[in-house]
Amino acid sequence: MIQGLYTASTGMTALAHKQDQIANNLANFNTTGFKQSGLFTAAYQNHLKNDHDQVFANRELKVDGVYIDYTEGAMRSTGSDLDMFIKGSGFFKIMTDDGVRYTRNGNFSLDTQGLIVTNDGAKLMGAEGYIRVEPNMKVTISESGEVIQNGESKGVIKIVDFEKPYELKRHGNSSFTPLDVTGAVELQSQGFLVKQGFLESSNVDLIRNMVKMISTQRNYEADQKALYAQDETLEKAVNMVGKVG
C-alpha cells in the first residue's frame, strides 16, 4: 500500500512538470522565434512481492528529460528594414552582457552608436565583428545576409549552426547557448536565406498544447484521487488493527 502511495505521487510529480512545460509554451505563443518544449517521460517497472509472496509488476512514471522542438515557425511580415527571418537552418549570433548567445528572433533595431541590436541590447555579430550603419538611412539586407547602405557593404550577418540533434540550453528572449560550451563547434549554416522585413513566429501549436493541457490535468486528478483513496484505506487499516479480536 505504501508503494501505491509512492507510485501515485511520482506520477503526479511528472504530470506537474509536464503541465509547467505546456503552460510555458502557451504563454509564449506570441513570442518571436520561440521554440516549444516538452517532456520525455519513462515508465519504470519494478517486480515486487505481496504478503503472500506473489510477484507483481509496479509501474512508476518519471521525468526522463526535457526536449525543445526546433521546427521552423511561420514567416510573418512586418515591413521593418531591420526585422529578419532565417529561412532554413541556423541562428543569429549575438553578444550579450553574459557572453555569446544564439537566436532566431530577428527583431533588431539600432542603438545610439548605429549598431544592430536586439530589443534587450545584445549586439548582432557579423562575419568580421559588429555591424554598424547610419541611422535614418535605408538599409538593404540580401538573402545571403549582406547589409548594404547607400550602395556600400556594411558587413555580412553571421548565421551559424550546430550539429544535429541540437544540444542547446534555453535562455530569455528566445536565445540559446550550447550545453557543452567548451566542446561545441560553430558551423557555417548551409542553404539558408535571410528574409528582410519578416519575423519568425513561435512554433507553438496552440490547439495541440491545449489538448495536452486538458489531458494532463485529467490524468493528474486521477492520480490524486488514487492517492487519497489509498491514504484513506491505509488510515482505516492502521486504526482498526488494535480493534481486531
Image: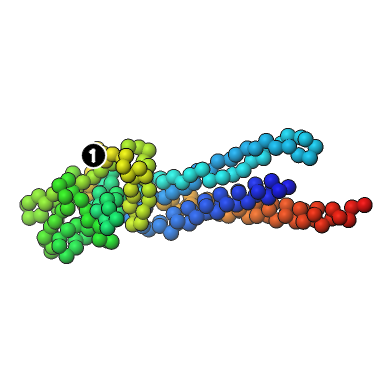
Residue under numbered circle 1: 188
Nearest the viewer among 236 and 120 is: 236
View extreme (right): residue: 245
At x 23%, y 39%, the residue is: 188
* Residue at point 32%, 39% (across, down): 183
Q: Is residue 151 left or right of residue 118?
A: left
- 19 vs 69: above or below: below
Q: Residue 226's x, y, as percent?
A: 69, 52
Residue 229 lies in quadrant? bottom right
In the picture provided, is 109 more to the left or to the right than 169? left
Label 1 Cα neighbours within 10 Å, binned few <14 / some 14-19 / many ≥20 = some
Answer yes or no: is residue 142 visible.
Answer: no
Report whether 72 appears left or right of 237: left
| Horizontal and vertical percent position of residue 146 | 15, 47
Is residue 153 positioned above or below 53 on the image? Answer: below
State the residue at coordinates (55%, 54%): 16
**Number of labelled discs?**
1
Q: Secondary structure at mark 1?
A: strand
Looking at this view, is 83 or 221 the one in front? 221
Q: Position of residue 202 (x, y in %)?
A: 37, 53
In front here: 191 or 240? 240
User: Where residue 158 appears, x then y in whole percent?
Assistant: 21, 46
Picture residue at 49% right of the left edge, 46% below the top: 39
* The furthest residue to the left: 151
Disc 1 residue type? Gln
